[in-house]
Image (cartoon, rainbow, N blue to C red):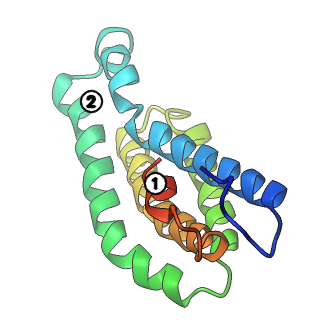
Amino acid sequence: MLSNVVLPKGRVRAYIAFFFIYVSYVSFYFNRKNYSFWFNELVTTVGMPLEQASAFGSAMELSYGIGKLVAGPVVDTATSPALILWGTLAISSICNIFLFSTDFYVLNVALWSANGIIQSAAWPALAIIFLNWFRNAPNKGTMYSI
């Protein structure tokens, strides 16, 4: 895949960059889609009503969708997509750490929604970083799809 890519930054650095781009995307994707893993625990173990537990998934998807409308232009105007990427990772981690640290339902939904808004900036930042690294790669489409 990267064997025929000639980059001024070096082939080894290209492999490392590709690895981190891939791991970052998978981490954000898993974090965004992990709701189905803990949904049943909310209902059975915690005893949260089904309607309230369902609101978490809706809040995340809705806030992520709204955030996607804003995130692309914001990331495009940013001086450092990498800084945005690290910021989204840090803030998303904080949201997840404090999620369910309180029994206040509205605060938990707000944290999960904030997580969705923040994560919406991750993919545009990763795409810009990817395109900066692999702009002239002959198999850019294959690499991008992985």
Left or right of residue 116, residue 14 in this image: right
**Residue drawn at 50 percent across, 85 percent down:** 76
Mark on residue 62? Answer: none
Asked whether 50 or 106 is in front, the reply is 50
Tell me the residue at 31%/14% (across/down).
47
Q: Within 10 angstroms of label 2, few (less than 14), some, or many (20 or more) residues?
A: many
Residue 134 image point, x, y percent: 61, 69
Given the current orientation, which residue lies at the most extreme top position?
A: 45
For the residue labelled by badge 1, is the local secondary structure a helix, a strand or a loop? helix
Q: Position of residue 68 (x, y in %)?
A: 35, 68
Q: Is 53 placed above or below 138 here?
A: above
Q: Nearer the viewer, residue 18 or 56?
A: 18
- Give the vertical position of 11 relative to 6 (above or below): above
Please name the residue shown 36% across and 38% down the image: 105
Residue depth check, mark 2 versus mark 1: number of the one nearer the observer? 1
Q: Which residue is mark 2?
A: 53
Q: Within the image, what quadrant is residue 51 found in? A: top left
The residue carrying mark 1 is: 142
Given the current orientation, which residue lies at the most extreme left position? Answer: 51
Nearer to me, 128 or 43? 128
Q: Is residue 74 left or right of residue 23?
A: left
Residue type of the residue flagged with mark 1: Thr
| Whether label 2 touches label 1, CB < 8 Å | no
Q: Is residue 39 left or right of residue 141?
A: left
As measured in the structure, the alpha-carbon distance from the residue carrying label 2 to the one carrying label 1 is 38 Å
Residue type at mark 2: give it: Ala
Look at the numbered disc 2 and give the secondary structure of its residue. helix
Residue 81, position in %: x, y? 63, 75
Crowding near the residue tagged with mark 1, few <14, some 14–19, many ≥20 C-alpha atoms within 10 Å? few
Question: Where residue 83 sits in the image (x, y, percent)?
Answer: 70, 72
Q: Earlier in the sequence, mark 2 or mark 1?
A: 2
